[in-house]
Image (cartoon, grey):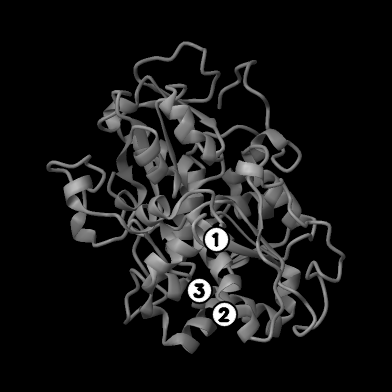
C-alpha cells in the first residue's frame, strides 16, 4: 500500500466525506429527506406500520430499489414506502444507513464485508441488485487500446471497496502492471497504473478534459463517456468475470427479525429485478431524466447503458474489443438476485490481493465460507423467487442447481 505523504489517509470511510464524493449533480441535495424519526427508520414495529425507507446512488445498480417503489410492488404487499432518496457518495450513504435513517439501500458488494468485519456493524446482504453493468472506458486519444496499455496511465475508480477496484487490479496483475496509489502529479512508470477515487458523474468530464486517461465504473457513466466525452469502452467487466455481482441490497440484521416485513421487502426487490430483466427499455425510461428522473442523464444514454451489447460495436473483430467472449451470451446489464457462495468466496479472496487506502489488515484473517454464512441472507430471495416461478427465471442460473454456480473469469 502506498505511503506517499501527498495521499490523504482514509482509514475510516464513514467519517471522511472526501470518499463520499460530495453532493449531487444538478441541484440534488446530499441527503434528501433524511431527518426521520426512529419509528419511520424501520428499526422496530410491525409490517403494517413500518415504512420502507431507502436510498441510492445515481447509477443503474439501484434499479431494483427504485422500481420496487416506482412500480408499486411494496404497496401491493401492504407496505408503505417513501420515494428512494438520491445520495451521491458511498460514504454518506453508508453512514445514513448505519445511523438508521434508511432501512434499505444498495452498496458495492465489498462494502458490507468492510462494514461487518472492520466496523462490526450487523449488515446483511438480502439480495444481489444486478449482475455485470460496469466497464473500463478510456479516452479515444488516451492510447489505451488493450490491457497492456494501462501501464503509465491515470485510472479513476468509484471506491476502494468496489468490484471495479478488484477487477482492474486483477487485470493489471495478469499483465505485469503494478498498481500504485499516489498523487496524479507524482512520477509514474510505464509499468505502473495509478488508481484514485472519483465520483462517477465526474468521470466523463475528467476524461474529456484529459485530466484522467480512463475509468472503470458502473453504468450509465460508461455510456455517457461514449456519447458525451469522446470515449470508448475497452472492456465490459461482465466479459472478464461472467455475470459477476456489483451492487447488493442490504438491511440491518435486526430488521430481519421481523420476518414478515423483511420478506415482503425482499419479495418486492426480486419482483422488480424480474420486471427489469424483461422490460429493459421501459426500465431505462423510468430511471432517466426523461422519465421519473431518478438518474441525471437522458433516456438515450440510460437505454444504451442497459441494452447496447453488440459485436459490431464492441467485438474483437472491427469493434472496440470490449467483448472477447460472445459465447458466454451475457448482457451488458442483467439481473440475478441470489447470492452465490462461489462469488462471495472469490470476492473475499480477491480483496486480500487488492490494494486500497486505509487499514485493510482485517481482510487477511477472513474465512470466505464463514463470510458467506454470516453476511448473506438467502432465505428471502429463495422464497420470493419461488413465488414468481423459481430462480431459473433469472440470468445465468442453472435450472437443475439454481443455488450453485461456477465462477468463470478470463482476463
Name the residue located 72 percent from the left edge and 37 percent from the top edge: 17
Q: Name the residue under label 1.
A: 248
Q: Name the residue under label 2.
A: 267
On the image, the x and y values in percent for residue 50 come to: 78, 77
Who comes first in sequence, dot 3 or dot 1?
A: 1
Q: Say whether residue 173 is left or right of residue 245.
A: left
Query: Residue 360 location, x and y as percent?
Result: 62, 39
Q: Is residue 395 left or right of residue 267?
A: left
Query: Which secondary structure, mark 2?
Result: helix
Is the Cβ of the residue at disc 3 closer than 8 Å to that at disc 2?
no
Toward which corner of the image does residue 160 lie, by quadrant? top right
Does 214 sit above or below residue 20?
above
| Residue closest to the far front | 290
Above or below, 46 against 12 in this view is below
Q: Quick check: can you spot residue 383?
A: yes
How crowded pointer 3 is (Cα within 10 Å; few <14, some 14-19, many 20+) is rated as: many
Q: Which mark is residue 272?
A: 3
| Element type where label 1 sits in the image | strand
Q: How far apart are marks 3 and 1 (CA)?
A: 14 Å
Q: Mark 3 or mark 2: which is in front?
A: 3
Nearest to viewer (mark 3 / mark 1)? 3
The residue sitting at 30% across, 55% down in the picture is 308
Amino acid at each position: 500500500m502506498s505511503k506517499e505523504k501527498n495521499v490523504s489517509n482514509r482509514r475510516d470511510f464513514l467519517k471522511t466525506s472526501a470518499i463520499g464524493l460530495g453532493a449531487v449533480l444538478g441541484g440534488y441535495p446530499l441527503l434528501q429527506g433524511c431527518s426521520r424519526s426512529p419509528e419511520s427508520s424501520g428499526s422496530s414495529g410491525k409490517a403494517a406500520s413500518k415504512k420502507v425507507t431507502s436510498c441510492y446512488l445515481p447509477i443503474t445498480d439501484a434499479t431494483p430499489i427504485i422500481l420496487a417503489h416506482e412500480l408499486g410492488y411494496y404497496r401491493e404487499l401492504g407496505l408503505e414506502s417513501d420515494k428512494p432518496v438520491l445520495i451521491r457518495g458511498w460514504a454518506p450513504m453508508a453512514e445514513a444507513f448505519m445511523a438508521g435513517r434508511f432501512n434499505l439501500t444498495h452498496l458495492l458488494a465489498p462494502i458490507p464485508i468492510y462494514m461487518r468485519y472492520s466496523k462490526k456493524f450487523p449488515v446483511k446482504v438480502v439480495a444481489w441488485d444486478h449482475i455485470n453493468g460496469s466497464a473500463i472506458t478510456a479516452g479515444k486519444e488516451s492510447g489505451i487500446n488493450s490491457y497492456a496499455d494501462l501501464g503509465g496511465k491515470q485510472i479513476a475508480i468509484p471506491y476502494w471497496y468496489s468490484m471495479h477496484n478488484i477487477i482492474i487490479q486483477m487485470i493489471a496483475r495478469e499483465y505485469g502492471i503494478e498498481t500504485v496509489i499516489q498523487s496524479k502529479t507524482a512520477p509514474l512508470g510505464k509499468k505502473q497504473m495509478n488508481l484514485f477515487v472519483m465520483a462517477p458523474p465526474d468521470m466523463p468530464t475528467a476524461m474529456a478534459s484529459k485530466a484522467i486517461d480512463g475509468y472503470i465504473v458502473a453504468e450509465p457513466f460508461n455510456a455517457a463517456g461514449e456519447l458525451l466525452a469522446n470515449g470508448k469502452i475497452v472492456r465490459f467487466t461482465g466479459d472478464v468475470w461472467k455475470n459477476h455481482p456489483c451492487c447488493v441490497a442490504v438491511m440491518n440484521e435486526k430488521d430481519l427479525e421481523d420476518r414478515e416485513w423483511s420478506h415482503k421487502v425482499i419479495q418486492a426487490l426480486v419482483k422488480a429485478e424480474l420486471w427489469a430483466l424483461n422490460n429493459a427499455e421501459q426500465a431505462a425510461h423510468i430511471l432517466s431524466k426523461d422519465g421519473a428522473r431518478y438518474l441525471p442523464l437522458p433516456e438515450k444514454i440510460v437505454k444504451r447503458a442497459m441494452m447496447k451489447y453488440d459485436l459490431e460495436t464492441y467485438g474483437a473483430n472491427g469493434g472496440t474489443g470490449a467483448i472477447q467472449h460472445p459465447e458466454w451470451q451475457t448482457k451488458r446489464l442483467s439481473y440475478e438476485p441470489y447470492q452465490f457462495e462461489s462469488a462471495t468466496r472469490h470476492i473475499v479472496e480477491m480483496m486480500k490481493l487488492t490494494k486500497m487506502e486505509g487499514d485493510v489488515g482485517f481482510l487477511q484473517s477472513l474465512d470466505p465460507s464463514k463470510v458467506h454464512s454470516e453476511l448473506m441472507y438467502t432465505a428471502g430471495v429463495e422464497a420470493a423467487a419461488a413465488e414468481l416461478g423459481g430462480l431459473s427465471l433469472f440470468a445465468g442460473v442453472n435450472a437443475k442447481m439454481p443455488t450453485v454456480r461456477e465462477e468463470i473469469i478470463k482476463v
